[in-house]
Structure formats: C-alpha cells, structure tokens
Amino acid sequence: MIAETVCSAVSAAGLGIAAVTAYRKRFLAATRIAAYSLVPIGLVMTGVVEWLADTAFSPTAWAGFAVLGVAWVLFTSTRVVERRRGGTRKERRAARAAARPEAVAPAASAPSLGQGAGPATRPATQARGDDDFSDIEAILKKHGI
C-alpha cells in the first residue's frame, strides 16, 4: 500500500515537472520527463511493485537467492580448477590438436630429408632474375622432385 502511494506521488511530481518544462517551450525534454514519470505508476498497475515487495520480505525468496549464489560459486570454482589443470590456453589447444588424427593418405609416407647431398650452390655468373628460380629448384631437388 505504501509503495503504491509513493509511486503515484513520484509519477504526479514527474508529470508536474514535465508540464513546467513544456510551458518553457522545451517540448522534447518535457515529453522525455513525462515518459520517465509514467514508469512508476505503470509498474504499480502491472503488479511488479507488489511482486517485488513480496519477494523482498519473503525468507523463501532470500533462501532461493542464497542457493543460486552457492551454485554460481561452485560453477566458477570448477572452471578455475579446470583451467589450472589444463595449463595455458595454448597448451590446451595443442593437446586437443594432437588428439585429433591428421588427414593423411593411407599409403603416404613421410618425406625423406636425407636424400639431398646438401644445400645447392649457385654459380656466381647467374643473372639476378634467375636467383628466385634457382632457390625453388634447390628446394625441389632437396625433396627429390
């Protein structure tokens, strides 16, 4: 009963301030003030204020909030422990990536790195434009292609 009276008084005062603001030819601000002042009376009419008053003075509601708080603490503590066990984020991602099998052809083998006789040397007489291709040729020879 008291909450409804207070909300009605706040709405009435807000509408009065909106009227004074409109009298001063500030219609946009007056409309905004009127909108804000109608919110408390709208909450009373929909029953939200009564529900909040019943919840605020209800021991069952406060016990429910306590249970929700305990659940939140348990959830966050398990997340912290899980993160500490798994190491850093990069380590966890690397472990997940290592657990997945890579897509490899059934008869494929690893490339042999020991076939080449060593890094290929270029003759000093080659032109500057051929340097790029000689590097590519050296890489291909190294891999036996």
Image (tube, grey):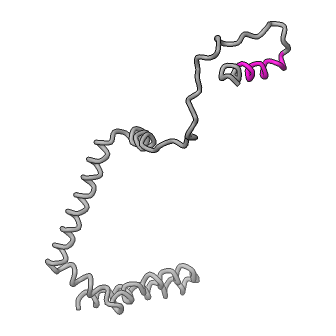
Q: Find the residue positioned furthest to the front.
A: 107
- Tell me where residue 106 appears, x and y as whole percent: 55, 40
Q: Is residue 72 above or below residue 99?
A: below
Image quadrant occupied by the C terminus: top right
> Toward the viewer: 16 or 73?
73
**Is 113 inside the magenta-drawn segment?**
no
Q: Find the residue positioned furthest to the left.
A: 59
Residue found at x 37% / y 85%:
40
**Picture quarter containing residue 10?**
bottom left
For residue 57, side relative to residue 33 (left or right): left
Magenta residues span 128-138
- Tell me where residue 98 appears, x and y as whole percent: 43, 39
> Toward the viewer: 140 or 58?
140
> Toward the viewer: 51 or 25?
51
Q: Main secondary structure of the magenta part?
A: helix
Q: Is residue 54 above or below residue 87?
A: below
Residue found at x 85% / y 14%:
127
Residue found at x 58% / y 20%:
113
Image quadrant occupied by the N terminus: bottom left
**Picture quarter containing residue 116?**
top right
**Is 135 inside the magenta-drawn segment?**
yes
- Tell me where residue 132 appears, x and y as whole percent: 78, 22
For residue 118, side relative to residue 2 (left or right): right
